[in-house]
Amino acid sequence: MEQALNWETFWWTTLGVFLTLSTFSFLYKDNPFYKFAEHLVVGVSAGYFVIILYYNGLRPNLLDHLFMSNTWTPRFDQLYYLLPLILGVLMWARFSKKWSWVSRYPIALYIGIATGIAIPLEMRNRVIQQVYGTVGQTGFDFAKPGFFGIPSGIWDVILVILVIASLVYFFFSKEHKGWFGGLAKLGIYTLMIGFGASFGYTVMARISLFIQRVQYIKSWWEMFT
Amino acid sequence: MTNETDKKLTFNERLMSIDRRWVFLVLAIFVVVPLILGFSVKPVVSDEVRAIYDFVENLEPGQNLLVAIDYDPNALAELHPMAFAIMEQALAKRLKLVTLTLSQNGAGMAEQAVKAVVDSVKMYHGYTPEYGKDYVFLGYRPYFALVILGMGQNFRIPFPKDYYSTPLDSMPIMAKIQNYDQIAGVIDITGSNVADAWIAYGNGRYGVKVALGLTGVSASDYYPFYQSKQIIGLMGGMKGAAEYEFLCKNPGPATEAMGVQTFAHIVIIGFIVIGNIGYFLDKREKAKRKKEM
């Protein structure tokens, strides 16, 4: 049975195809179609973000506490919400040469709270847990097969050596010569392998974006067939 | 004028300075043609992707799973297939699905994704999930770190209402959920540093199990967290999504794309090899000339 064409979907999809092709036209050279698509995406994103921020941030987190939702009648039971409002407004003082010093107070408070929360957790997650993950959690099990049939214990030893070698590369208080230089060089190769993996993933990511747009154009084309 | 410049270039130099537009054109051909012809490859499932699948699969019906759709439309190509596959798997298993987004431009897209998954579950699994009872979309709140910390105390702090302004307490699904203690695990699908916050605050501060679905660009940065068991699993880019679709026996856009990726990667490797041949030939020629002088 032939399916009826939904004109609304068709026109929006067609617009999407036009904007996709306009964006890709930059690969040949800069042109007005690309500029139009570029400005449109920046403008729409900014406008969308402002509305989303108002309805999902400012309104539920502040305005709904200070005013009744529908009538905008002031509420007097949660007046302490004026404090974050005042702190927020003070941030805007940065735009005045005379009053910019006032903005330091809310910024100091914000940074103080953020730092207090972040430092202990980041220390735990990025340092202690990572060191434990490298040395403490490696089993050094020489009976268990790992990659390419090589025992996983051997891979664990290699892992620890390469981590130390990478750290040695960033140790600049001793000249990179002799065995120390050799270890630093091994560190460079380790880092290169890491960067290579990142590069490979990045290539895949960029191609994925292109493939998705081609899939989109294909779906538009299939509307005609 | 371009031709005059071209005439001066040696063969080696030409290899190293191919006009990028030729590269784009060849790449476009090798993407479009396999996509039209429908070439596919069978993905090899990695341990880190299987870990997420097994985790979801081993949950009991009725348990709560939180899927954070923390990405903008610009990462949709890689992350949508992951979100679709996981949410469909969860609903088909009769898990209670809590969804939200911590990405400012992702709210509308995330809502559409949840609706599309529900439609798909209705169509292919013969089960009609009910909003507010079987799944919920909490919407977006700014400042992701504070939201993640807030949910650790009580979901009602950052989200007193859901995306449609329904109070959380009026929904059966949220009646038994106060904080992460009632959540079996969080699957964060993101292309930004929201993943760091989920690891640091969700897992580090409150001990909730976290798994990540990431864009290819950021995937390699998070493998250390998998190795240190701070996350239970990781999906990287389109490949990770294709592996997950394969495990769920639910082939989608990622599976279709991986066949095309194969061709695209061969083209890129080919151009890298051409550039390197040019580089080494040029190096040898210069050394030879230097010797003759």
Image: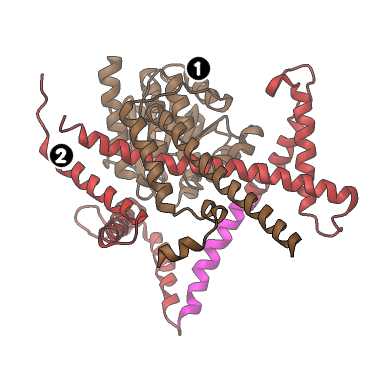
Task: Identify the hue of chain B.
Answer: brown
What number is the disc on residue B58? 1
Q: Position of residue A68 (x, y in %)?
A: 25, 54
Tell whether A196 sits left or right of A144.
Answer: left
Residue A97, by quadrant, is bottom left
Q: Amino acid at mark 2?
A: Phe
How many marks can you see? 2
Would residue A107 be counted in the magenta stretch?
Answer: yes
Color scheme of the displayed model: by chain
Residue A160, by quadrant, is top right
List the residue tagged with mark 2: A10
Would residue A69 be counted in the magenta stretch?
Answer: no
Q: Chain of mark 2?
A: A
- Disc 1 with disc 2 on a shared chain: no
Q: Position of residue A122 (x, y in %)?
A: 63, 48
Q: Position of residue B39 (x, y in %)?
A: 38, 25
**Magenta-colored span:** A99-119
Foreground of the two, A106 or B236: B236
Task: Identify the hue of chain A.
Answer: red
